[in-house]
Amino acid sequence: MIRLGRVEWLASVASTLAVFGVLVGSGLSFATEGDDAVPRLSGDYAFVQTRTCAQGAAGQPGMGDNLVLLSPATNRVAASRGVMSFDGQGGGRFETEELQLNMNIVAAGAQQVGNSSTTCALSYEVDRSGQVRIVLSDCFSIGLSGSITNLTFTASDIHLDGRLSIDGKTLLLSDLDPSVSTGTAVRAR
């Protein structure tokens, strides 16, 4: 059973989100004092991700501060693959396909998996040391198969932290601090 309403997404950044660069370029180097480091991150980066989320009861929040459940919740695990496109000026786009597994549905014959497609606007900052801060905003997802077919999802901003390699070809996103984002699901007509 799909419950429509708010969904709390706990981006499982504790499980590593690795992003591998597909950049070709020369002269990439760490910025020096006074240089703008944002242009160092430019181009398309493919990624794979694993995350977990807690979906609250219909119309109820799922998770609050300090990861405290605020209502009975359904737990989901999702595997994603996609591309982050960085424009070298602090903006870009995030696109992903995702396969979800609802961990609480255990009855024989029940649909517990679904596939979705997501796009988000992306903004980012890079400091001189290669530390990267990314914000995904205006996220929109649509359910493509399984129990989430024709559901649309929107989410509050998602914050990611990472480190850019010296040559600019690899971006590793990994964080031990959980990132909680609120999402809303609506069945398309």
Image (cartoon, rainbow, N blue to C red):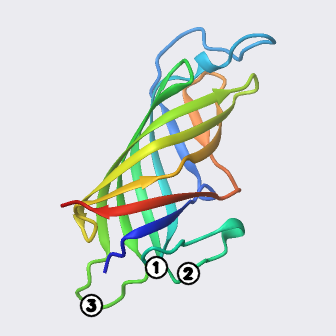
Residue extending farthest bottom: 107
| Of 97 and 183, the residue lying toward us | 183
Circles 1 and 2, Cβ within 8 Å, touching? The answer is yes
User: Quarter of the image holding residue 105?
Assistant: bottom left
Q: What residue lies at 73% left-to-right and 11% top-to-bottom?
A: 35
In this view, the residue in front, 20 or 114, is: 114
* Dot 3 amino acid type: Ala
User: Which amino acid, by three-letter code, is at mark 2?
Assistant: Ser
User: To which quarter of the image does residue 76 belong?
Assistant: bottom left
Circle 1 SS class: loop
Residue ID at (77%, 12%): 32
Cβ atoms under marks 2 and 3 closer than 8 Å: no
Which disc is residue 71 wearing? 2
Along the line of sight, the residue nearer the viewer: 152 or 42: 152
Q: Earlier in the sequence, mark 2 or mark 3?
A: 2
Q: Distance between the residues labelled 3 and 1?
A: 22 Å
178 over 128 or under it: above or below: below
Q: Position of residue 125 (x, y in %)?
A: 64, 28
Element carrying mark 2 = loop
The residue singled out by tag 3 in the image is 108
Q: Mark 3 against mark 1, which lies toward the viewer?
A: 1
Q: Which residue is drawn at 50% across and 36% down?
A: 20
| Crowd class of label 3 (few under 14; some 14 to 19; many from 20; radius 10 Å) | few
Q: Where's residue 67, x and y in %?
A: 66, 70
Q: Sequence order check: which comes first, mark 3 or mark 1? A: 1
Q: In which quarter of the image is the N terminus?
A: bottom left
Which residue lies under the disc numbered 1? 57
Asked whether the residues under the numbered discs 3 and 1 touch, taking CB atoms below 8 Å apart as contact, a structural biologist would say no
Q: Which amino acid does label 1 sit on?
A: Ala
Residue 120: x percent and y percent?
43, 41
Name the side, left or right, on which 55 lies relative to 69. Answer: left
Mark 2 and mark 3: Cα distance apart in space: 26 Å
